[in-house]
Image (cartoon, coloured by chain):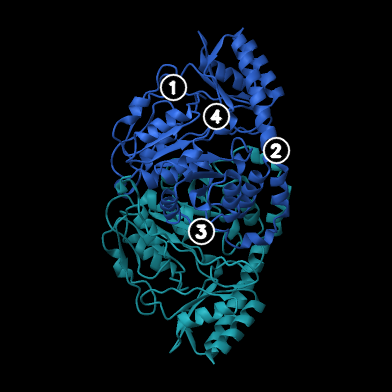
Chain colours: A cyan, B blue
Amino acid sequence: MREDNFRKVIPYTPGEQPGGRVIKLNTNECPYPPSPYVVRALTEMDPDRLRLYPDPLCTRFIKALSSYYKVPENMIFAGVGSDDVLSMCFMTYFNSGREILFPDITYSFYDVWADVYRVPYKTVPLLDDFSLDVEGFKAGNGGVIIANPNAPTGRLEKTETIEEILKANNDSVVIVDEAYIDFGGESALPLIFKYDNLIVVRTLSKSRALAGMRLGYAFGNEKLIKYLNDVKFSVNSYTLNTPSILAGEAAIEDDAYFKEIRDKVIKVREETKQSLKEMGFEFCDSMTNFIFAKKQGMDAKAVFEKLKERNIYVRYFNKPRINEYLRISIGTDEEMKTFIKALKEILE
Amino acid sequence: MREDNFRKVIPYTPGEQPGGRVIKLNTNECPYPPSPYVVRALTEMDPDRLRLYPDPLCTRFIKALSSYYKVPENMIFAGVGSDDVLSMCFMTYFNSGREILFPDITYSFYDVWADVYRVPYKTVPLLDDFSLDVEGFKAGNGGVIIANPNAPTGRLEKTETIEEILKANNDSVVIVDEAYIDFGGESALPLIFKYDNLIVVRTLSKSRALAGMRLGYAFGNEKLIKYLNDVKFSVNSYTLNTPSILAGEAAIEDDAYFKEIRDKVIKVREETKQSLKEMGFEFCDSMTNFIFAKKQGMDAKAVFEKLKERNIYVRYFNKPRINEYLRISIGTDEEMKTFIKALKEILE
């Protein structure tokens, strides 16, 4: 067998998915169950439908998004989680052979997608306070991708900053990954009507409590969405299965429940910030469902391990500039109290 | 916006998915519902689990396949339908820059994947009886993909033929797409223990009545499966959602039901062959859940349209060498009787 047959890559490493009774604060899931509308949609689904292919256009999910966000259906794309959507975006929009740009500290899948699709890239270092170096994104490029709020820092950039980057990049596509926007940020969504180079990507995994269903979507002008759909239909005609289309529709329709659980997450996040501050932790003012925190003199990796011994899972990244930090997803009030208590004991 | 940013492709066109009460014989779905085990697995699933990411390794589905087919778990890969599995295979195994080979008449997604992943390819014309030109697959190549039984012809090749092609291609990966193997063919599966260049791809969409759930899988030696998983984890960590993992496990475990519905499809297929033969149709001796048939002097496109007017959907391909044929999926006994009656009336 000739080895040059193979595409060899270093894959992304997702956070652990431990079984059993643990406090799971490591993959930014929602601590509350999905909407009762979702449960009803799945219960009422006729299982006989599963013998037929799903709707390749995901019409019911797209229509629900269109109605909720007031965006025409032909400006919306759906995928198997925002990872699938972002992956398709890399394939579709970053083909010029010119370097794409993204921050050095951001979602660690971006460089993996660049590698797997052979897209050249350059990272633009965040400033010391983890804010975007806007000038760095004004250099000629083959595309830009920015997570806002950023992960794992939790830091939110103003829409004006995003717009400044859009204006400086008329020639290339700018993707704004808004996986965490529902937890307090202002979305760039209205800008899709003003800039033909903007793609806004979202997920139902975090604020809609549907990580297990794999649902993501994107907004952009009609032409960008058409190109994205052409690539999708060249990879897999039917990506979303029937239960996920129905669950997606139901989750979007239950706005009251969405706001209720989002507000609970925000309340617990602010209380957790307060507790961490009192313990001497430093962190960006997170507008997400996690906090990225360090403490002077703390061995973050050791604390990560000690928390795990107590069945409390947080995330630690052994990477330059961020290896003193822990990323802590916001759980329930009770889970965060247990976490803070354990953290205090470990640090004593 | 610079147009060279974009990957431009001509996407695959799936068969129509009409709503309402129609007789749907156009996308080779199963006319019977999925196993009661599947219904139970979905009903018993705790909806609260959907707030958590699914198992990225699809362990329960893989374990069920391993146990059923007596293949070690590290020789099995799972994906979102066999389309997802095949798409990943194209990305992973066809990277040498040398031309890959497949028949001129076969699953019409192969050239689409080749185009989207920029894989050069050459088609090897089928012989006049739609059998494989084995010698044509012995030329130097960057990979081979063969559907067995073939679609849309329905023709089955012997395992000896597959083995001859495997032996002639030590240097490259040979993919055997066995989407329809359960309907009467002998699988190449045992050959994965003998040839390190073989990948066998399967689906639960046809013989397991789960097209709506999107479940596919592949067998191959440990090294091939590892490379495939590396690419998968570089594209999307969590491809199968939680309901599909549970449904896949349940479907594989219900062997008795699988055999019952498979046997019904085969019985109705043979009866349909008999009816078509009596009407003067010609066709390969299909070992699939469809029949690819023509009749001297019949305008296939016109008949396809007239059937549609009667709410009976079959598939017509406006392509060289096959534009005189209709591809007719096997429905229930009653559906096929209605179809034959309508066909007779149209041809009178």
Whole-number angstrom distance, CA of label 3 to CA of label 2: 40 Å
Q: Residue at x 70, y 51 (%)?
A: B41
Cα–Cα gap, marks 4 and 3: 44 Å
Tell me the chain of label 2.
Answer: B
Q: Tag 4, which chain? A: B
Q: Are marks 3 and 1 in contact (CB under 8 Å)?
A: no
User: Which residue, given by chain and number where applicable, does mark 2 sit on?
Assistant: B257
Q: Residue at 63%, 44% (x, y): give it.
A: B252
Question: Where in the figure is residue A209, as x and y percent of width and height?
Answer: 61, 62
In the rendered structure, which amino acid carries the disc numbered 3?
Arg
Q: Nearer the viewer, residue B6 or A211?
A: A211
Q: What is the secondary structure assignment of the residue under circle 4? A: loop
Tell me the subunit letter for badge 3: A
Q: Which residue is mark 1?
A: B131
**Residue highlighted by disc 3:** A202
In the drawing, what numbered circle is on residue B76?
A: none
Q: Which residue is mark 4?
A: B185
Question: Is tag 4's residue or tag 2's residue first in the polypeptide sequence?
Answer: 4
Q: In the image, are marks 4 and 1 on the same chain?
A: yes
Q: Earlier in the sequence, mark 1 or mark 2?
A: 1
Q: Which chain letter goes with mark 1? A: B
Do discs 4 and 3 share a chain?
A: no
How packed mark 4 is, by other alpha carbons closer than 10 Å (few <14, some 14-19, many 20 or more), is some
Q: Tell me if I can see residue A196 in this picture.
A: no
Q: Amino acid at mark 2?
A: Tyr
